[in-house]
Amino acid sequence: GNSVTQMEGPVTLSEEAFLTINCTYTATGYPSLFWYVQYPGEGLQLLLKATKADDKGSNKGFEATYRKETTSFHLEKGSVQVSDSAVYFCALSGGETSGSRLTFGEGTQLTVNP
Amino acid sequence: DSGVTQTPKHLITATGQRVTLRCSPRSGDLSVYWYQQSLDQGLQFLIQYYNGEERAKGNILERFSAQQFPDLHSELNLSSLELGDSALYFCASSVDPRDSGELFFGEGSRLTVL
């Protein structure tokens, strides 16, 4: 079945550091890929998405490129801020699953220190 | 604010009891999803409804049931509760079940079973 694997956390960075959170997936067919973010005490919010190979999703300075050859969708940001502290989830939908039910990775806790 | 409303926000109960969690989707959204977030299992898809009909079922226990009413709100019923059912339960909604994973999440209902 579908699965998503994220790099283990937690990740702690200083403000203005470069961020990479690795995500790889297993799916049949052509899934859509997503990054969701969960700020403390809140529900998940869609951060960015990519629906086909080589697509780049971007939002709020974050970027991720759908790499079918490596089955990856790594999240990057060139300069993180304290306000980026949150839990980040990689997810996929489609592929062999129906509708838009999402399969999530384990989540990566990011803490950015001033 | 995602527009998805969940009640109650917190619930503490005892083993063997039954609880009902309620979700009001965003205005205009026809599809409702329930997810369970726990420390050991991460985010698990439970069940999806579209316009009152069950659309997809995930890792939902037989002790759990859900429904979506004509006004599109949904309820998740958890019975014969066990300690391991303690978790954060999220509801999410989307306009169309083919919406490629763009879900809008509520803030969750935190269930503690003592």
Image (tube, rainbow, N blue to C red):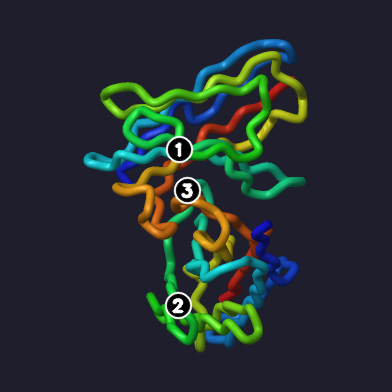
Q: Image check: B50 left or right of A93?
A: left
Give residue B37's mark: none
Do marks 2 and 1 share a chain?
A: no
The chain holding disc 2 is: A
Q: How many marks?
A: 3
**In this rendering, which labeled residue sits more in front, label 2 or label 3?**
2
Quick check: marks 1 and 3 in contact, CB under 8 Å?
Answer: no
* Residue wearing tag 2: A52
Q: Residues within 10 Å of mark 1 (few under 14, many from 20)?
A: some
Q: Image check: B71 left or right of B111?
A: left
The span from disc 2 to disc 1 (Cα, nearest Å) is 25 Å
Residue A27 falls in which quadrant of the image? Answer: bottom right
Q: For the point 72% across and 72% down, which residue is it?
A: A7
Give residue B55's mark: 1
Q: Position of residue A22 (x, y in %)?
A: 66, 77
Q: For the point 63% across and 21% down, which residue is it?
A: B12
**Sequence-first disc among 2 and 3:** 3
Q: Nearer the viewer, residue A30 or A42?
A: A30
Q: Secondary structure at mark 2?
A: loop
Q: Secondary structure at mark 3?
A: loop
Amino acid type, label 2: Lys
On screen, residue B24 above or below A19: above
Q: Position of residue B29 (x, y in %)?
A: 28, 42
The span from disc 2 to disc 3 (Cα, nearest Å) is 29 Å
Amino acid type, label 3: Glu
Q: Residues within 10 Å of mark 2 (few under 14, many from 20)?
A: some
Q: For the point 30% across and 43% down, which residue is it?
A: B3
Q: Position of residue B105 (x, y in %)?
A: 43, 46
Q: Image check: B45 left or right of A3?
A: left
The span from disc 1 to disc 3 (Cα, nearest Å) is 26 Å
Give residue A42's mark: 3
Q: Secondary structure at mark 1?
A: strand
